[in-house]
Image (tube, rainbow, N blue to C red):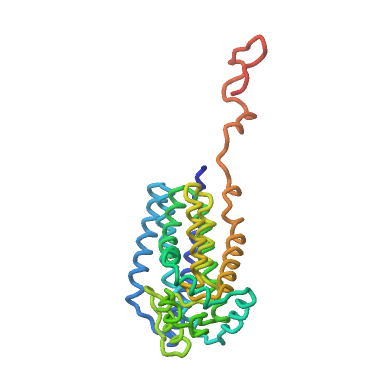
């Protein structure tokens, strides 16, 4: 497969402008006194992002190794974005808009979803639990792996497409979650682990944080270890779609990525305490973001290297009279 042409500095510039703008928003809330910031928790991710970005710039501009430069810069953008997007989701939750669980649960019932029955189905099957837990927990690893795989495969335009779709999808979901917050079916339906054969969602650690942000008892943002507190739409489901879409052209792993992220989507309701409606909404946001950004990162639209055939109609630098003639006329063009 032909490697993509390296992305223009504009694409990277847009990513860093987005990260900077979010950082300014978070800093503004801290400056106004609405939130406090745990400064030390921001030092490590921002330092790592800066080092990776510097390394990426070195390999791109000095060593002219586009793939390695793209991998380093892409990873830097993901790390930097994660450090500011997590705090932004905390600000969104603290907005305190009315919870929408009743509406979301009603939509699930219209889809024929029996939440208690679904959880018990998973809880009674240890093998299924293990597979779904592995897929759901692969979220962070897949984020970095997708960047590295696309870089190694030389699909640099697709790498840029993935990073920008990742950011756009996350920001849209944070915005929607601010005005349509939800606690999730476990809390809303008051499900208990004892009634579900001891099953408990991975996301249970986020519930106290979400509730504390809403009642005002938590007003600190962190750059590391930010809890995933968004219910509607599901960010896990959305990014699962982006992982599979981004890796689809890497033939050796496309089916592995599709299977893993298919399992991730299946795992999201139970392990993430999401309504099925959340999953469908997350898929929709990801699909729209990916399709909307596709024209900007389509390798086919990039200028291609000039082919030798384009030289045919140009005048020869060798005088015509100097070329030997044959019985059938002048020499054929190469």
Outermost residue, front direction?
124
Left or right: where 73 falls relative to 266? left
* Residue drawn at the location 60% of the way across and 31% of the way down: 309
In this view, the residue in front, 236 or 109, is 109
Left or right: where 292 falls relative to 20? right
* Residue drawn at the location 53% of the way across and 52% of the way down: 248
Residue 299 visible in the displayed image? yes
In this view, the residue in front, 15 or 99, is 99
Q: How many marks?
A: 0
Left or right: where 204 falls relative to 118? left
What quarter of the picture does the C terminus occupy? top right
Q: Where residue 29 sits in the image (x, y, percent)?
A: 46, 83
Q: Where residue 9 sits in the image (x, y, percent)?
A: 49, 56
The answer to which image quadrant residue 169 occupies is: bottom right
* Residue drawn at the location 47% of the way across and 53% of the way down: 256
Outermost residue, top direction?
327
Give above or below for 218 relative to 258.
below
Q: Where residue 314 sits in the image (x, y, percent)?
A: 62, 29
In this view, the residue in front, 86 or 14, is 86
Q: Where residue 136 sits in the image (x, y, percent)?
A: 45, 66
Give above or below for 140 relative to 308.
below
The answer to which image quadrant residue 312 occupies is: top right
* Residue drawn at the location 44% of the way across and 56% of the way down: 147
The answer to which image quadrant residue 319 occupies is: top right
In this view, the residue in front, 130 or 175, is 130
Residue 138 visible in the displayed image? no
Give above or below for 34 relative to 88.
below
Give above or below for 64 relative to 11.
above
């Amino acid at each position: 497969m032909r490697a993509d042409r390296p992305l223009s500095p504009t694409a990277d510039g847009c990513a860093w402008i987005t990260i900077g703008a979010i950082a300014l928003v978070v800093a503004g809330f801290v400056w106004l006194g609405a939130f406090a910031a745990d400064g030390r928790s921001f030092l490590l991710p921002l330092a790592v992002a800066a080092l990776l970005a510097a390394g990426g710039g070195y390999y791109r501009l000095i060593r002219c190794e586009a793939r390695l430069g793209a991998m380093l810069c892409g990873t830097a953008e993901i790390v930097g974005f994660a450090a500011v997007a997590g705090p932004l989701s905390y600000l969104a939750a603290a907005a305190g808009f009315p919870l929408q669980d009743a509406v979301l649960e009603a939509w699930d019932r219209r889809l024929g979803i029996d939440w208690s029955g679904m959880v018990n189905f998973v809880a009674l099957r240890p093998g299924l639990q293990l597979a779904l837990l592995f897929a759901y927990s692969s979220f962070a690893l897949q984020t970095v792996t997708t960047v590295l795989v696309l870089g190694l495969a030389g699909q640099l335009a697709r790498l840029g497409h993935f990073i920008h779709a990742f950011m756009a999808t996350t920001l849209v979901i944070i915005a929607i979650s601010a005005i349509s917050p939800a606690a999730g079916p476990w809390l809303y339906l008051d499900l208990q682990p004892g009634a579900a054969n001891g099953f408990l969602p991975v996301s249970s650690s986020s519930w106290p944080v979400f509730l504390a942000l809403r009642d005002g008892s938590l007003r600190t943002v962190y750059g590391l270890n930010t809890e995933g507190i968004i219910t509607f739409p599901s960010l896990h489901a959305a990014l699962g779609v982006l992982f599979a879409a981004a890796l689809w052209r890497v033939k050796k792993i496309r089916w592995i990525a599709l299977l893993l992220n298919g399992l991730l989507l299946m795992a999201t309701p139970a392990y993430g305490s999401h309504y099925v409606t959340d999953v469908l909404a997350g898929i929709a946001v990801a699909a729209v973001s990916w399709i909307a950004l596709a024209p900007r990162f389509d390798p086919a639209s990039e200028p291609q290297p000039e082919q030798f055939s384009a030289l045919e109609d140009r005048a020869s630098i060798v005088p015509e009279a100097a070329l030997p003639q044959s019985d059938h006329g002048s020499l054929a063009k190469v």
